[in-house]
Amino acid sequence: MKTKNFPGTSLVQLAEGDEPDRVIFSEQHSAGAKSAVYLLRHGDWKYVRYMEDYPPQLFNMASDPNELNDLAGDPGV
């Protein structure tokens, strides 16, 4: 099979690399969902932003890996 050359940079090295301090961004647009969801992860922290109807969320993934304790409204964070 012939390989096609596409412009841009391969993400393989980024995905396989070991950079624990890198910032991770993700977005999700599900069919039938009321809102898009954007996620930002840096270190132990995960920030979730919904575009409509829901307040943002903030989780400490080291102490709360199941995302049960939303810290977005905690002024001490």
Image (cartoon, rainbow, N blue to C red):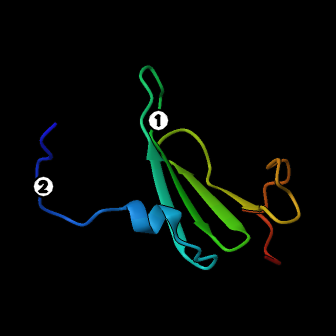
Give the amino acid type for the residue marked by disc 2 in the picture: Phe
Task: Tell me where residue 43 appears, x and y as whole percent.
Answer: 68, 74
Task: Tell me where residue 44 appears, x and y as whole percent.
Answer: 74, 70
Classify 5 as above or below 37: below
- The mark nearer the N terminus, 2 or 1, is 2
Give the amino acid type for the residue marked by disc 1 in the picture: Ser
**SS type, badge 1:** loop
The quadrant of the image that shows the N terminus is top left
Residue in front for this viewpoint, 34 or 67: 67
Task: Tell me where residue 41 appears, x and y as whole percent.
Answer: 60, 65
Residue at the spot of label 1: 35
In the orientation shown, which residue stands out farthest toward the right? Answer: 63
Which dot marks residue 3? none
In the orientation shown, which residue stands out farthest toward the front? Answer: 1
How far, Cα to Cα, is label 2 from label 1?
32 Å
Q: Which quadrant of the view contains residue 14?
A: bottom left
**SS type, badge 2:** loop
Give the residue at x 48% y 41%: 52
Which dot marks residue 6? 2
Left or right of 11 on screen, residue 65: right
